[in-house]
Image (spheres, rainbow, N blue to C red):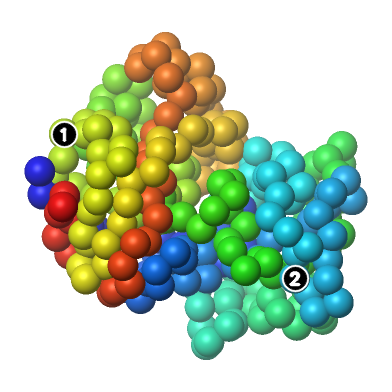
Amino acid sequence: MTGRLVQILRHPIKSIGLEEIASASLSEGGALPFDREWAVLTELSKIGRTADGHATGWGKKVNFVIGRSAPPLMQVIAQETAPGRWVFAHPEASPLEIDPSRPEDQTRLIDWLRPFWPADAPVPTAVVRAPGQPLCDEPYACVSLIGTASLADLEARTGMVLSRRRFRANLWVEGWEPFAEFGLIGKRLRIGTAEFEVKERVGRCRATDVNPETGARDIDMLQTLERLYGHTDLGIFLTVTAPGDIARGDRVEIL
């Protein structure tokens, strides 16, 4: 069962901005470079901020600004314009160009977010950098992958067009049967010159209810997945076991 890597996506700030890239160099035990490298804390966060701007540790998504709480955030697109510098764009706001490591730009980011943040949700308070691992939903550095056929099957059964952006996966692979990736748990893959171990399924959350084109909830995704498939999973988590380079068009081989 050989597939082909057709899209690589990363999210420099957790839940805020998605960027498509053509290639990436991966390190053993690492994540996609700059994926979930930063996150925005809220007033209810139990995660602290060190003097140099890093999070005091990994934390669950409830500690951060997330799309589940503010659906319009699902519309944000990111683009790296220079090393460490990104432009964030939203259809209802002027583009914001920042270096997330700069305190003055962190303030600008929080101000830029306020119009999208519900009045009854915890207030965004500070931007933090990852504490040695990405601030993803799992307590280990991982890369997420979804087979395009799995999404196509879901679209066919719901009669809806469901953007890949809705699911915030890092890698999209074509050429497999629907949900074939679930059968890869515990196996090893090679993509480009990098190697991976498949760890577990990705359990979805309510952020996937949101259409990233409109910023509105248009489906109960968890209920739909449960009704159609008997579970609420879509995609798999991988860990990098051998460093290497990946690029669009690479073969995805099972070792």
Res 89 visible: no
Image position of 140 with respect to 243: above or below = above
- How many numbered callouts? 2
Q: Residues within 10 Å of mark 1 (few under 14, many from 20)?
A: some
Type of amino acid at the residue the image marks with label 1 = Glu
| View extreme (bottom): residue | 82
Q: In the structure shown, which secondary structural element does the residue marked by tag 1 occupy? A: loop
155 vs 252, left or right, is right
Image position of 47 with respect to 86: above or below = above
Marks 1/2: CA–CA distance: 41 Å
Q: Position of residue 197 (x, y in %)?
A: 32, 51
State which tag comes first along the sequence, 1 or 2: 2
Front residue of this view, candidates 121 and 232: 232
Q: Position of residue 194 (x, y in %)?
A: 27, 67
Where does label 1 land, which residue? 177
Residue 3 is tagged as none
Q: Position of residue 242 (x, y in %)?
A: 31, 67
Front residue of this view, candidates 84 and 199: 199
Residue 54 is tagged as 2
